[in-house]
Image (cartoon, grey):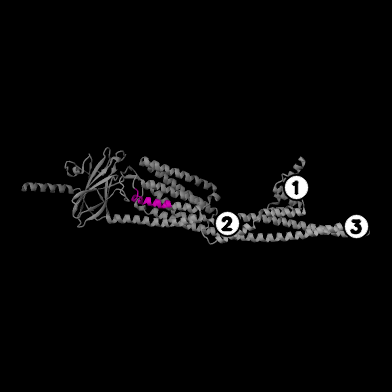
Amino acid sequence: MKLNYFLSLLFVLKASFLFAQNTYVLEDKPVQKIEDFEILMDKNYTFEQILNDSTLEFQENPKSYKFETEEYCWFRFSIQNNSAYGKEYYFSLTPKINNLLYYYDFDDEKWKTTQAGLAITDFKRIEGIFSVYLHPNKINTFYVKSKVNELNEQEYPIYLSIYIYAKEAYENKEQFIVVSWLVVTIAMLLFFIYNLYIYFVFRDNTYLYYLIILLGAILYISAFSDVFNFVLPFNFYNIGINSNGVLYAYTTRDILNFGFIWMILFGYIQFTRSYLQLDIYFPYWDTILKYLTYFLSLFSLFAIIIASFKSLNIYYSLALISNLFFSIIILMIFSVGIMSYKNGYKPARYFLIANTLPLLGIMSIALYLLVYKSSSSSIQLLPHLTLLSQTLSFAIALVARINLLKDELKEKQLQAEILEKENGEILARNRYIELENEHIIADMATAVNKEIDLQNKIKSEASQKTELEQKIEEEAKQKADLQAKLEANQRELTANSLYLYQKNEMLTNLQKQIRGLSYKNSSTQNKDGIKEIKSVINNDIQLDSDWNNFKIHFEEVHPNFFKELNEKYPTLTKNEIRLSAYYHLNMSVKEIATLLNINPRSVHKAKSRLNKKIEAIDKEN
């Protein structure tokens, strides 16, 4: 009996000694790598067999392994906690596709399981992470059954590794990531809500594209921080192994990032077109950026589909091309901003200032991903800071743009007031001339009557012929003076009427500009003033009536002129009829050129064309 007890004790001590050689002694470090583990290729073993069958031999850590036909692989490792206190740790095991962990609960005195990996939806931010409790002053043994059949077709062997993370350090890092995401997201949401209100008030497309950028930035940061893993009930993945044996995965996060980057760049391009008014100042570049958005959409859709169903090497090639393409788009946007600034477009200065820091950040991310092909903790906050700075700088640029629009609106209002004043003066002068013409016409009628009376007196009073002839000559001279004065007044009326016509056209254009500016102005302080100016301008615009008034006054002195001219030369244009009227008033070339605001040489050419046209019509008749 004692002999059997001794042999059993000896066996246990020997087994403990052999097993202790593969035990990792826990250290006080935030991150530790376990290399003392063993593996066993699965052949449909049960856990009871793995636990109790001594004929199953685990082999020591081979560092890397090329799986060919295996479906599962067993891992075994032990961690010795020499502390008097139990400690909670997190650990990950590569490959982390679908891992089933077996651990012994000393409190319940039984083995328990938990599962994690890319193929498992556990609503955790990071896939493949296990939470374990290391009992004090004990050797804690763990078994992991890892599904490896998806690695059989890989070209390179995979590097096997186990890392453990101290709970406090790991959770502090997780908390930092989540809190930083939450702070940036809340800040962007506040900007989004505020600018959404501004958009609904003014319906300015620039704000609409800014909202698209904000929404894309919020979603991109959420995907970049793996926040969607908390809520998505599924997880898509496509794995690959590089030449260094490192396992990479194209997951749901990467698909979402492609879509959200497209949203940001789409809004970016459209924001640039609207903010810089490229359709007005640079229509060529506006067309290029317009079609660039179509190409960007097709390219992003193509990249998502191809990378989802093909090998991961194709994804890396697409990522390389995408980052280069996105960088070219950003540089193109920046170049257009520089061109607008050089051409004197004032808002372009604020556009460049607002875009410099975000563009540098986006370029840094693109270049980093281009070189390292994956994100790491070293750039975890770079997208947050870049997109947040973009949000703030764009908001500042929009405010600066509004201030510029206010200044431009004030300048247009001042021009409107000056033109309104000049228009009033011209109208008063025209009214005075009309009244004076009425008196002249009345005096001319009186003179004609007197002339008739004198002629009658000549017939009836031969003896008073000489005296009457003198009176007739005086009346004729008076009539000639009145006629000359009438013609002078008619020329002045003509000039003023045409000037009024041009002023009204300027007021009409100015009215359109003020209306466009008032829609883009986010301030409501000048709305009443703008409405009052619009009303005054509308009342002062008399485009058609002024020319008709001119014709009426002209025909009072030259009856049937326009009627006879149209009957004799029906093919004359409106401008040719007007030119004929000016020449009929014996106006000089210089006076006509001044009225029409053209070069005297152009008046000569117009007169020559008119004479040729009249001669041609005369020959036909």
Q: Is residue 125 magenta?
A: no
Tag 2: amino acid: Ile
- Check disc 3: other Cα within 10 Å, few if <14, some if 14-19, many if 20+: some
Does dot 3 land on a helix, a strand or a loop? helix
Q: CA distance from mark 3 to mark 1?
A: 38 Å
Determine which residue is flagged by label 3.
458
In this rendering, position of residue 222 left or right of residue 413: left
Earlier sequence position, callout 2 versus callout 1: 2
Determine which residue is flagged by label 2.
514
In this rendering, position of residue 72 left or right of residue 487: left
Q: CA distance from mark 2 to mark 1?
A: 42 Å
Does dot 1 land on a helix, a strand or a loop? helix
State the image quarter where residue 97 is shown: top left
Q: Position of residue 475 (x, y in %)?
A: 85, 59
Of badges 3 and 1, the one in the foreground is 3
Residue that lies at the very extreme toward the left in this rendered image: 1
Earlier sequence position, callout 2 versus callout 3: 3
Q: Position of residue 273 (x, y in %)?
A: 51, 50
Tag 1: amino acid: Leu
Determine which residue is flagged by label 1.
565
The numbered disc on residue 117 is none
- Check disc 1: other Cα within 10 Å, few if <14, some if 14-19, many if 20+: some
Q: CA distance from mark 2 to mark 3?
A: 69 Å
5 lies above or below 434: above
Q: Which residues are magenta?
A: 215-232
Question: Do residues under tags 2 and 1 come within 8 Å of each other at their CB atoms?
Answer: no
Does dot 2 land on a helix, a strand or a loop? helix
Tag 3: amino acid: Ile
Earlier sequence position, callout 3 versus callout 1: 3
